[in-house]
Image (cartoon, rainbow, N blue to C red):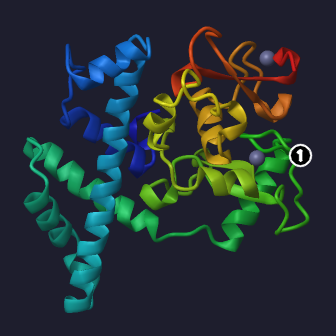
Amino acid sequence: MGKNSLTPGEQLSELISEVVHSENPESGFLKNMDNLLVADGEFLEMQKKSIIFYTTRRLIHGASYALEKAMVHYMDSQNAIPVIKDYLTNNYSFSLTEEQANRLHALVYSCVDASHKDLSTAQRNKALEQFRRLEITTCYMCGVEIDFDSVDNKNSASVEHLFPSEYGGDSRFENLALSCKDCNKHKDDHMHPSDFHFEKISTKHDYGHKKFSKQLLVSKQVVAMWLKEGCECTICGKPASAAGMLSVFQKEPADSWHFLNIGVQCSAHNEG
Ligand SMILES: [Zn+2]
Ligand SMILES: [Zn+2]
């Protein structure tokens, strides 16, 4: 399993994390937030990751736009790599070795390319067949039994890109998962739990915000919690695909309902 077993998008975000150096600060606003949340560095880590995924998003969108504009002028794709190279060289000043720069250009190009490739009906059907052959019949995020026969129910079958196709998650089988239509919609094009505006949840708490409760978490945020915990019960490790829908709980009951203090639990661990 070399680097090539990762999708172009994952490879790109790995490369970005190598070149965008952001040491965890010893002091300052973010460090204070981490202390306030008693997060023990976890908030800083999430913050760092969100910057990496945000940078990935911007590089791909920017390059994609530059390329589209160039296509209008040149009407052919021969200029694609130089155009992307030019865009990246002029807009981002990471300090890159020549080898890293070449890899960055090629990866951004692969990501832009992957973002234009939707699953064909044949690919989708083949993946669904493969899931059934592997006896995978439930949504990996919420655990609902998938309805393979309809297309417009909440629990209709969706073939989900684990790393989103929009950002260079290609359609190799290892990057595909069976999900219900609803979860696929909520996960949207987020690349990682840190990519769901986690800081908005991190800084919400119940002390002084009496109205904040787990009932107020919107579906998209609940999906972010599931993904943060690997879609497994935080306590026993049973996956949602076998345990059914996981509910949120406070890991440390004395602490507030912030992103990092929220775990997910199976029904056996849900005291109700
Ligand atoms: Zn689901
Ligand atoms: Zn459990």
Is 42 situated left or right of 263 in this image?
left
- Is the shortest distance between ligand 1 and the CB of mark 1 under 8 Å? no
Residue displayed at 73% across by 21% down: 233
For this rendering, which residue is in front, 149 or 45? 45
Q: 172 and 140: which one is in front?
A: 140
Residue placed under numbered mark 1 in the picture: 145
Where is residue 29 shown, x and y percent of the image?
25, 25
Location of residue 10 (image quadrant): top left
Measuring 36% from the left and 24% from the top, which residue is drawn there? 45
- The quadrant of the rendering that contains the C terminus is top right
Residue 41 appears in the rendering? no
Please provide percent x and percent y for residue 149: 91, 64
Residue 141 appears in which quarter of the rendering?
A: top right
Rendered location of residue 180, percent (x, y): 77, 53
**Horizontal side of residue 144 vs 73, given as left or right:** right
What residue is rendered at 85% in x and 63% in y? 153
State the SS at label 1: loop
Q: Is residue 104 left or right of residue 97?
A: right
